[in-house]
């Protein structure tokens, strides 16, 4: 197995953990949102605004499937990737899946600390952020929880690396 897909809620640490694991494994890190932005020459938020969410989700599924051609990659997916167009089932067939099950309290703190990176939560207080995250978690948990690995910590560790390394071998 030469692909690892990270899924989870916004601010769960997908990018940070994917970069860390890619470095430890000697693999390439791919950020799915950055891949879409570079190919479309638009930000994710502009794509949402101009084309709408459904068009974005179709693009996302297309670019996710393009990772099939890549080898030895750790892919940090967008928060919603797993919940659309059969993407989670596709990822489970074509690679190892890892759900970063970071606590809602940690996520609220991360989002509140840097609202500029999270327009979805713009202008919301911590209680509103928690409510929004809870709704998202409820809608997506069926997809996230089907990942091969569920990591219930807020930071990566050597234990996570050893588990991943053993499963990709």
Image: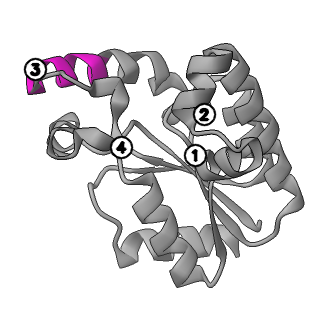
Q: CA distance from mark 3 to mark 4?
A: 20 Å
Q: Nearer the viewer, mark 3 or mark 4?
A: 3
Q: CA distance from mark 1 to mark 3?
A: 26 Å
Does the magenta portion include 127? yes
Task: Report the predominant secondary structure element of the magenta stretch.
Answer: helix
Residue 77, numbered label: 1
Residue 32 in the image: state x and y as whole percent. Answer: 64, 49
Q: CA distance from mark 4 to mark 1?
A: 14 Å
**Which comes before the other along the chain, label 1 or label 3?**
1
Q: Which residues are magenta?
A: 126-134
Whether tag 2 and tag 1 are in contact, CB under 8 A, the answer is yes
Residue 125 in the image: state x and y as whole percent. Answer: 11, 23
Regarding mark 1 in the picture, which secondary structure is present there? Answer: loop
Residue 102 in the image: state x and y as whole percent. Answer: 29, 45
Q: What residue would you read off at disc 3? A: 127
Regarding mark 3 in the picture, which secondary structure is present there? Answer: helix
Does the magenta portion include 168? no
In the rendered image, the vertical position of residue 154 relative to residue 19, given as above or below: above
Name the residue nearer the viewer: 70 or 92: 70
Residue 52 lies left or right of residue 129; in this view the side is right
Q: Quadrant of the C terminus?
A: bottom right
Q: What residue would you read off at disc 2? A: 81
Q: What residue would you read off at disc 4? A: 101
Quick one: which residue is furthest to the right in this view?
A: 69
Whether tag 2 and tag 4 are in contact, CB under 8 A, the answer is no
Q: CA distance from mark 2 to mark 1?
A: 6 Å
**Which comes before the other along the chain, label 2 or label 4?**
2
Residue 8 lies left or right of residue 78; in this view the side is left
Whether tag 1 and tag 3 are in contact, CB under 8 A, the answer is no
Crowding near the residue tagged with mark 2, few <14, some 14–19, many ≥20 C-alpha atoms within 10 Å: many
Q: CA distance from mark 2 to mark 3?
A: 25 Å
């Amino acid at each position: 197995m030469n692909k690892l897909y990270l899924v989870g809620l916004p601010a769960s640490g997908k990018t940070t953990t994917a970069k860390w694991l890619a470095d430890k494994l000697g693999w390439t890190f791919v950020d799915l949102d950055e891949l879409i932005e570079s190919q479309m020459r638009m930000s994710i938020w502009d794509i949402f605004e101009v084309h709408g969410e459904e068009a974005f989700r179709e693009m996302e599924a297309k670019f996710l499937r393009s990772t099939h051609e890549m080898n030895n990659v750790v892919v940090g997916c967008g928060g919603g990737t797993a919940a659309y167009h059969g993407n989670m089932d596709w990822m489970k067939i074509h690679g190892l899946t890892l759900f970063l099950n970071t606590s809602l309290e940690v996520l609220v703190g991360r989002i509140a600390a840097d609202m500029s990176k999270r327009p979805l939560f713009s202008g919301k207080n911590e209680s509103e952020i928690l409510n929004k995250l809870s709704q998202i978690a409820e809608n997506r948990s069926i997809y996230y929880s089907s990942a091969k690995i569920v990591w219930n910590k807020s930071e990566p560790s050597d234990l996570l690396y050893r588990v991943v390394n053993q499963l990709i071998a």
